[in-house]
């Protein structure tokens, strides 16, 4: 069977730490092209993960001009997600774009439109949907065990873990701080669990209260206050068309002990779910025989995914799903029409924080 030829645009931390190791486990693909504005990064990635004749580029347009390339992974800073994805789709490539989908709703919608126009498959890197806790919760929700979910919390809070490498602190490159970085994961998971993508109104607050401090005890070393141009925490209050409420909390630096990310809390008419320890554990609460009951499923028992005998991480499962959609026509776990709603809500939180007014959605 002819292997799918894959091109990588962006060879930084998210490529090396997530996508390239996952791609290496997909037997049906070969990585044949690597692009980064820093040529040495592309060369290093090509040497470690590419075919013997893998090509290296500093201009993504040269990479996507190669008609033999079938798939492109867009792993750049957020600012470049939209136009590289759109150009790649129109060049006849399927695209995996790292989260968040884009900096703005308009850019994200352009990506969705391009996928529809070209008929190519587009997905976004929300691998936390693939965690054992998330998948188990989804099964419970879909089985109706929670009833009507009318309140949820998307939780992405760090006490002191500001990423001090790359361009994470650069508002122009990223579009924001923890809200668009880790809050996007928690919100995506929450909307997916609820299967609710119709927001009505958003109120948001954004703070930069700790970004100017020094001697911070940060997990990855002190940040440079002069380079800290994004928020250090953000909070959103979201009401949906069906009356449901979602609260979103995201921080890189917050004086709290209530920490954890990639987690959601779901409250329904029959029961509730909350995630613990970074989404690795789950609790289900309900009432049985007129008694309050809390159940903690053992997610380690049969909770580890395998494919052809290989143990799969969340990122492996995400990658496998994308390529199965291309090769077998199976359903995408993360659809671009869902991811665009995440971006729209995040943008509304930033807008509300800036104007001090609610943002209403009219469609």
Image (cartoon, rainbow, N blue to C red):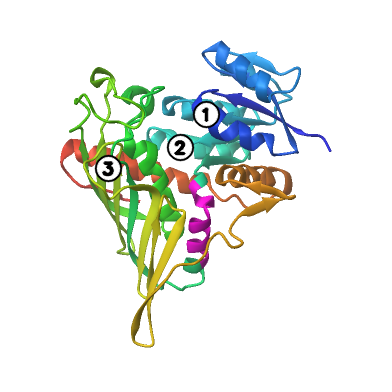
Q: Whole-percent x and y of residue 64?
A: 63, 22
Dot 2: element: loop
Image height check: is 144 above or below 14?
below
Task: Tell me, yes or no, whether the highlighted magenta stretch contains residue 131.
Answer: yes
Disc 1 on helix, strand or loop? loop
Residue lying at the far bottom in this picture: please name it. 289
Q: Are marks 1 and 3 in contact (CB under 8 Å)?
A: no
Span highlighted in magenta in the image: 128-139
Q: Is residue 8 visible?
A: yes
Which quadrant holds residue 148? Answer: bottom left
Residue extending farthest to the right is 1
Expressed as whole percent of the image width and height from the top left, the position of residue 239 reads 28, 57
Residue indicated by mark 3: 349
Residue 64 tag number: none
User: Outermost residue toward the left?
Assistant: 356
Question: Count of labels shown?
Answer: 3
Q: Confirm whether the magenta stretch covers residue 89.
A: no
Q: Secondary structure at mark 3?
A: helix
Query: Along the horizontal axis of the image, is 348 left or right of 315?
Result: left
Which residue carries the number 2 mark?
A: 101
The N terminus sits in image quarter: top right
């Amino acid at each position: 069977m002819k292997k799918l030829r894959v091109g990588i645009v962006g060879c930084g931390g998210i490529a090396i730490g997530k996508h390239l190791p996952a791609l290496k486990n997909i037997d049906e693909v070969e990585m044949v092209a690597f692009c980064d504005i820093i040529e040495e990064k592309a060369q290093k990635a090509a040497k470690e993960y590419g075919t013997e004749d893998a090509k290296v580029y500093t201009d993504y347009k040269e990479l996507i001009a190669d008609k033999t390339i079938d798939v492109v992974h867009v792993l750049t800073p957020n600012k470049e997600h939209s136009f590289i994805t759109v150009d790649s789709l129109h060049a006849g490539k399927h695209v995996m774009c790292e989260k968040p989908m884009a900096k703005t709703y308009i850019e994200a919608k352009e990506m969705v439109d391009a996928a529809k126009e070209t008929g190519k498959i587009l997905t976004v890197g929300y691998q936390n949907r693939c965690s054992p806790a998330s998948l188990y919760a989804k099964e419970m929700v879909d089985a109706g065990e929670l009833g009507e979910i009318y309140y949820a919390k998307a939780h992405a809070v760090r006490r002191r873990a500001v990423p001090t490498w790359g361009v994470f602190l650069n508002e122009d490159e990223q579009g924001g701080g923890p809200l668009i970085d880790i809050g996007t994961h928690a919100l995506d998971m929450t909307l997916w669990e609820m299967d609710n993508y119709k927001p009505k109104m958003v109120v948001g607050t954004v703070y930069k209260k700790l970004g100017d401090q020094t001697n911070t005890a940060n997990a990855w070393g002190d940040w440079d206050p002069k380079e800290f141009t994004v928020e250090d925490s953000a909070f959103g209050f979201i009401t949906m068309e069906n009356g449901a409420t979602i609260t979103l909390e995201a921080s890189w630096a917050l004086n709290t002990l209530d920490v954890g990310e990639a987690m959601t809390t779901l409250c329904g008419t029959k029961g509730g779910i909350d995630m613990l320890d970074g989404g690795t554990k789950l609790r289900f609460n309900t009432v049985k025989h007129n008694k309050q009951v809390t159940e903690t499923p053992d997610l380690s028992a049969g909770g580890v995914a395998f494919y052809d005998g290989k143990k799969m991480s969340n990122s492996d499962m995400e990658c496998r799903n994308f390529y199965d959609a291309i090769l077998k026509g199976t359903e995408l776990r993360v659809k671009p029409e869902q991811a665009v709603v995440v971006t729209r809500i995040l943008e509304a939180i930033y807008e509300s924080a800036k104007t001090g007014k609610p943002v209403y959605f009219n469609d």
